[in-house]
């Protein structure tokens, strides 16, 4: 049995000024990258100060793993948040799968990518990646993130499921995905951004909670449910 998390009626969309949106997205990307970059610096400091061969080997391993992690996060952010490709460009879902695996797959979390390889409009690929990362965050103890695409091109619908122990979605995230929240900050900018991308694609996001995790469905928005515009409160960027 599932519980719908998204609003039952079309919400008024929260609007951010372009500078606020850009600042919060930059803050989010920096948050994602700063941890592995800091680990690289720590590893280099160990190499400078240590003469013991075993410690130097540990430091080199830390540097390599952290560099791989930073690269994976940057590649993901480039597709999920950036302007990859030209205006109106399509992106190979095989490339999206590659960057999603690099970021999301760990010893605890598996990625079940069941989307047939095709070229999709770049905004749909961005939305698919953002929903995948949001879904992965709902299962911090690990589990499975399942990704599906139904249909092709502009008619494609996106579905992302998370399955894991004690799955939990951050308070307000479902509303932000649907554009119904009154405020947003740098911590919650990703679901807000995903909601904007969905609107640009002509999709509506529905979030449901199941026994094992969460279901995120982005499907074409019925013409009668097109949301109205409104201005909401903004929290300062972190």
Image (cartoon, grey):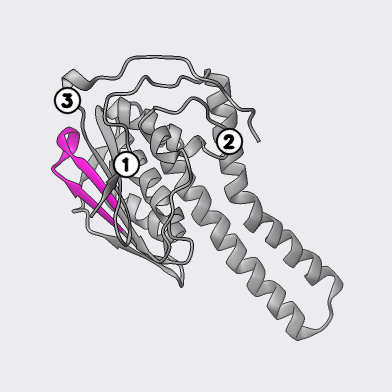
Q: Name the residue under label 3.
A: 222
The quadrant of the rendering that contains the N terminus is bottom left
- Image coordinates of residue 116 in percent, x first then y, are 18, 53
**Element type at mark 3:** loop
Badge 2 marks a residue whose secondary structure is: loop
Position of residue 231 in the picture relative to residue 10 (left or right): right
Using residue 234 as the reference point, say whether residue 49 is left or right of it.
right
Looking at the picture, tell me which residue is in the foreground, 234 or 26: 234
The location of residue 126, given as percent across then percent down, is 36, 40
Q: Earlier in the sequence, mark 3 or mark 1?
A: 1
**Measured Cα–Cα span from mark 3 to mark 1:** 21 Å
- Which residues make up the magenta segment? 146-160
**Residue 225, can we see it?**
yes
Vertical order, 37 against 21 (above or below): below
Q: Could you tell which of marks 2 and 3 lies nearer the N-terminus?
A: 2
Of label 2 and label 1, which has the lower sequence position? 1
Quadrant in the picture for residue 101: bottom left
Give the side of residue 49 with respect to residue 9, left or right: right
Query: Number of labelled discs?
Result: 3
Residue that carries the numbered disc 2 in the rendered image:
186
Q: Is residue 24 above or below residue 40?
A: above
Local packing at callout 2 (Cα closer than 10 Å; few below 14, some 14-19, many 20+) is many
- Circle nearer the viewer, 2 or 1: 2
């Amino acid at each position: 049995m599932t519980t719908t998390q998204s609003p039952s009626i079309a919400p008024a969309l929260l609007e951010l000024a372009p500078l606020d949106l850009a600042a919060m997205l930059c803050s989010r990307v920096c948050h994602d990258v700063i941890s592995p970059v800091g680990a690289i610096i720590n590893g280099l400091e160990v190499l400078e100060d240590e003469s013991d061969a075993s410690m130097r080997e540990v430091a080199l391993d830390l540097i390599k793993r952290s560099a791989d992690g930073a690269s994976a996060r940057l590649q993901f952010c480039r597709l999920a948040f950036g302007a990859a490709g030209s205006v109106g460009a399509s992106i190979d879902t095989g490339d999206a799968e590659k960057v999603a695996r690099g970021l999301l797959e760990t010893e605890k979390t598996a990625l079940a990518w069941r989307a047939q390889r095709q070229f999709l409009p770049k905004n749909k690929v961005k939305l698919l990646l953002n929903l995948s990362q949001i879904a992965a965050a709902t299962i911090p103890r690990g589990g499975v993130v399942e990704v599906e695409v139904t249909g092709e091109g502009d008619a494609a619908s996106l579905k992302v499921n998370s399955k894991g122990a004690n799955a939990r979605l951050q308070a307000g995230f479902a509303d932000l995905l649907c554009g119904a929240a009154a405020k947003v900050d740098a911590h919650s900018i990703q679901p807000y951004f995903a909601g904007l991308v969905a609107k640009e694609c002509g999709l509506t996001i529905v979030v449901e909670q199941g026994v094992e995790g969460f279901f995120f469905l982005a499907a074409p928005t019925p013409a009668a449910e097109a949301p109205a515009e409104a201005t909401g409160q903004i929290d300062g960027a972190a």
